[in-house]
Amino acid sequence: MLQDVLSSKGVRSTSNRILVLRALENADMPVTLADLEVMLPTLDKSSIFRVLTLFLDHDIVHSFEDGRGVENYELCHNEGECDHHDAHSHFYCVKCHRSFCLDNVDLSAIRLPDGFVAQGLSFVIKGVCKDCS
Ligand SMILES: [Zn+2]
Ligand SMILES: [Zn+2]
Ligand SMILES: [Zn+2]
């Protein structure tokens, strides 16, 4: 239930929030604000953005920059508060402008210098996806 996803993250359900959450779930891949505007013709851009900002604050979504300066949003699949253990890398296709999750690329091998603490991870490979190549 979408309502349960929101309540498990400490967020009250509203119709706008449910609509945005459903769109993110149906997309099944990272989406941009512009994608969501197309998917949610009944909501204006600022309403969608407000919901996304709230979702980010509550770890309902994570965002990353896709390498052309555009934020992409995707659902967090951890319950409750998330310290971004689900961080993974992404692939951005320069032809169809879609972003893909690369869940099987192991990022735990990345070693930071002493004294550096990671708080998030944004790692994007640019190229051409299998549909476009
Ligand atoms: Zn998460
Ligand atoms: Zn492509
Ligand atoms: Zn992803």
Image (cartoon, rainbow, N blue to C red):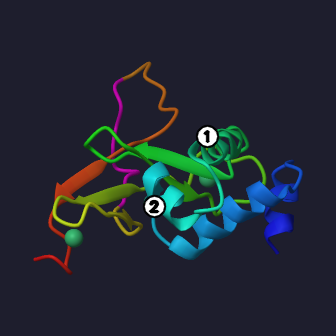
Q: Residue furthest bottom?
A: 131
Q: Is residue 33 above or below residue 93?
A: above
* Residue sitting at x 34%, y 25%: 113
Q: Horizontal and vertical percent for residue 115? A: 44, 18
Give, as a single range, the part of the protein colored magenta: 106-113
Residue position for label 2: 30
Specify the amino acid type for callout 2.
Pro
71 left or right, relative to 132: right
* Residue sitting at x 85%, y 66%: 3
Q: Residue furthest left?
A: 133
Locate the C terminus and report the quarter of the image it occupies. bottom left
| Residue closest to the eye, 49 or 68 | 49
Nearest to N terminus: mark 2 or mark 1: 2
| Image quadrant assignment for residue 64 | top left
Magenta: main secondary structure equals: loop
Q: Which mark is residue 133?
A: none
Residue 72: say if magenta.
no
Q: Horizontal and vertical percent for residue 68? A: 25, 42
Report whether the residue tagged 2 is closer than 8 Å to ligand 3.
yes
| Residue closest to the eye, 111 or 123 | 123
Specify the amino acid type for callout 1.
Ser
